């Protein structure tokens, strides 16, 4: 049998090609596909330059895809250079061997059975097999096998075409895994996420978005959000898209309707460019903008904040009512005392003139006594029944948090920093929440006023809560103000005393006296220390289970 190295193109293309091919054709190796022999014969016989059969042969030789031709038992008769390169076998090692030389034992038998079932039925088969190279290295082969028929319809050969798709497949798997992971994270995220196309239509949404949509009775949440966002940002979706304007943490409230009522969200939007994935966009890159909308729900915090505000307003109203009551009583007292005082003045005048008849004077003094008595009785009668709020278990941390919430704007405005360190688990104090709220509000207001005083070292104060071993709760407020001078400390708890250097119209001087009254009512106490570093430390101590002696008043 003549020896022919089909892989050596230089033999075929240059010089000796004619001799080699002639020798080959004179005694072709057994089972060389008739198509190959036919093509070569045609080439040798033809001087026609238009698409000579050799051209087809050259094409197969140059193809970057592995091509093999086998007999009907899958014994290799021909393998092109790309096949050699991919498998690391030389074609001479391949010719005569079965295609199973490439088989890797991890390929399921069923794959080969499918392949052979198709070929046996005269059909082509495509699929992915696990192959191994000469050195045993595995690779994924995307294989197509097809039967080659003789003129009388008999299968004479099989044609195999395969590519190494390992990298592509692994890449696809990696992309798929990443996509899966990202989708799961987005879907599980406890925030509402939606990707909008350039017309504001939702392209992708997560579970939280879908739940919100159900809560909204099927209305599109994005539409509701943009009605509010347009107001807040002063621009609608189109305007934002034109300027590619992103936005961050925009607080909005949406009336969801139904049982859920008003809900609060903090929304951020980021414009994202997507490349169009059509074939004609490969060279002519087309970008489409989309908006990634991420909305974090703040409803719980906002409800808490609103509640704190309502509670604080209630406390302040109760306090205002109390002080209005006091001023009413004081006015009434002034009016009632006016009579006896006028009589005393008249008596003094009589005495001054020396015209005082002791009997007259005596009866005048009796009248003074009488009208004084009457005034006292009337005042006592007009004392309002104090409808004190009932006592209940109160979490002091919660009250401090509420006061911090409602003082937040002022702190921000006045650039005051607070460090708030609650003891995580604090026993509940049996007390009157509104009274305790106003007590804490006065103390916090005082701390802010203190750091605003001349001589304050920093604009900071701290609040610490603490449970003592003997079952008391302490609130310690330490400011960086000028501290409390001894002279002021003795008077600070008197009603209407104002010791601030910086006068403020809003301060009536009742703060600390109200604090003292609330503490008396709760069996608590207050200590004032001047810190070494300047500033004032106020420690309020409240017993946890004090019945305050007022159990029987209620
Ligand atoms: P085999 O005994 O060869 O085959 C397994 C089963 O296939 C058998 O039990 C039988 O049911 C069926 N089968 C085998 N031969 C025939 C037949 N002549 N007629 C009908 N059914 C039959 N395999 C690869 O692993 N990688 C390749 O890249 C690859 N390329 C191929 C290209 C061509 C053109 C052809 C025709 C086959 C190719 N094969 C390839 C299949 C290969 O010939 C083997 O069938 C396969 O590798 C399994 O080998 P095996 O020794 O484990 O089992």
Image (cartoon, rainbow, N blue to C red):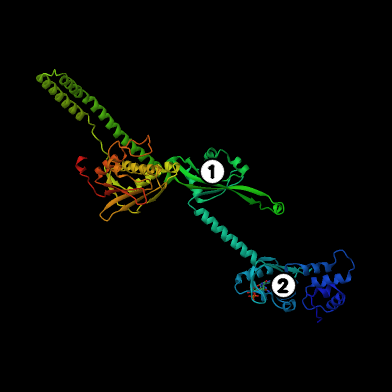
Eyeballing the image, is 495 above or below 60?
Answer: above
Compared across the picture, whether 296 is left or right of 62 comes to: left
Q: Regarding mark 1 in the picture, which secondary structure is present there?
A: helix
Q: Which mark is residue 222?
A: 1
Name of the residue lying farthest toward the top: 355
Residue 470 on image: x %, y %: 25, 54
Compared across the picture, whether 195 is left or right of 255 comes to: right
Compared across the picture, whether 165 is left or right of 336 comes to: right
Frontmost residue, 153 versus 214: 214
Name the residue at 27% across, 29% down: 328
Ligand 1 within 8 Å of the CB at mark 2? no
Frontmost residue, 25 versus 427: 427
Name the residue at 66% across, 77% down: 135
Residue 327 on image: x %, y %: 28, 30
Asked if the residues shown at circle 2 and circle 1 are in contact, with their CB atoms under 8 angstroms apart, the answer is no
Which residue was labeled with disc 2?
85
Choose the circle earlier in sequence order: 2 or 1: 2
Ligand 1 within 8 Å of the CB at mark 1? no
Name the residue at 32% across, 34% down: 320
Name of the residue lying farthest toward the right: 47
Frontmost residue, 387 versus 210: 387
Residue 429 on image: x %, y %: 28, 48
Frontmost residue, 509 versus 264: 509
Eyeballing the image, is 160 above or below 1?
Answer: above
Q: Which mark is residue 430?
A: none
- Look at the image and tell me in which quarter the C terminus lies: top left
Name the residue at 83% across, 79% down: 27
Residue 223 on image: x %, y %: 54, 41
- Look at the image and tell me in which quarter the N terminus lies: bottom right
Is any part of residue 54 visible from this angle? yes
């Amino acid at each position: 049998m003549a020896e022919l190295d089909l892989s050596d193109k230089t033999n075929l293309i240059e010089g000796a090609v004619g001799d080699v091919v002639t020798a080959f054709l004179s005694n072709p190796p057994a089972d060389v596909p008739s198509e190959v022999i036919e093509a070569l014969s045609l080439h040798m016989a033809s001087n026609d330059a238009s698409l000579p059969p050799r051209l087809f042969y050259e094409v197969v030789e140059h193809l970057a895809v592995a091509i093999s031709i086998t007999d009907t038992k899958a014994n290799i008769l021909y393998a092109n250079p790309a096949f050699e390169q991919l498998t690391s076998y030389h074609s001479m090692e391949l010719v005569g061997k079965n295609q199973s030389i490439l088989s890797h034992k991890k390929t399921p038998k069923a794959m080969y059975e499918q392949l052979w079932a198709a070929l046996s039925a005269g059909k082509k088969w495509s699929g992915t097999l696990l192959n191994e190279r000469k050195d045993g290295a595995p690779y994924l082969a995307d294989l197509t096998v097809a039967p080659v028929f003789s003129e009388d319809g008999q299968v004479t050969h099989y044609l195999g075409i395969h590519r190494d798709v390992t990298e592509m497949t692994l890449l696809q798997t990696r992309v798929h895994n990443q996509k899966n992971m990202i989708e799961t994270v987005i879907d599980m995220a406890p925030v509402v996420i939606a990707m909008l196309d350039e017309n504001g239509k939702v392209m992708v949404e997560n579970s939280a978005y879908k739940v919100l949509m159900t809560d909204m009775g099927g209305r599109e949440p994005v539409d509701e959000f943009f009605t509010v966002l347009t107001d807040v940002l002063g621009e609608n979706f189109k305007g934002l898209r034109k300027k590619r304007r992103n936005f961050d943490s925009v607080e909005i409230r949406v009336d969801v309707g139904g049982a859920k009522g008003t809900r609060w969200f903090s929304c951020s939007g980021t414009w994202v460019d997507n490349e169009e994935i059509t074939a004609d966009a490969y060279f002519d890159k087309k970008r489409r903008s989309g908006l990634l909308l991420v909305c974090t729900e703040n409803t719980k915090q906002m409800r808490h904040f609103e509640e704190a505000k309502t509670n604080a307003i209630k406390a302040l109203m109760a306090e205002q009512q109390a002080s209005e009551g006091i001023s009413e009583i004081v006015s009434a007292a002034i009016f009632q005392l006016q009579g006896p005082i006028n009589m005393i003045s008249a008596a003094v005048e009589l005495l001054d003139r020396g015209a005082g008849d002791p009997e007259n004077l005596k009866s005048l003094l009796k009248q003074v006594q009488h009208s004084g008595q009457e005034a006292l009785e009337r005042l006592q009668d007009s004392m309002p029944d104090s409808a004190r709020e009932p006592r209940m278990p109160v979490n002091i941390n919660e009250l401090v948090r509420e006061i911090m919430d409602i003082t937040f704007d002022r702190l921000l405005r006045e650039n005051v920093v607070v460090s708030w360190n609650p003891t995580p688990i604090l026993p509940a104090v049996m007390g009157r929440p509104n009274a305790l709220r106003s007590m804490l509000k006065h103390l916090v207001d005082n701390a802010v006023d203190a750091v605003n005083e001349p001589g304050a070292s920093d604009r900071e104060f701290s609040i610490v809560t603490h449970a003592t071993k003997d079952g008391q709760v302490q609130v310690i407020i330490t400011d960086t103000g000028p501290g409390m001078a001894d002279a002021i400390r003795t008077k600070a708890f008197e009603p209407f005393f104002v010791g601030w250097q910086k006068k403020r119209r809003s301060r009536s001087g009742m703060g600390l006296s109200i604090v003292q009254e609330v503490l008396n009512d709760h069996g608590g106490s207050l200590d004032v220390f001047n810190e070494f570093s300047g500033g004032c430390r106020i420690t309020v101590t409240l017993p946890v289970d004090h019945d305050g002696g007022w159990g029987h008043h209620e």
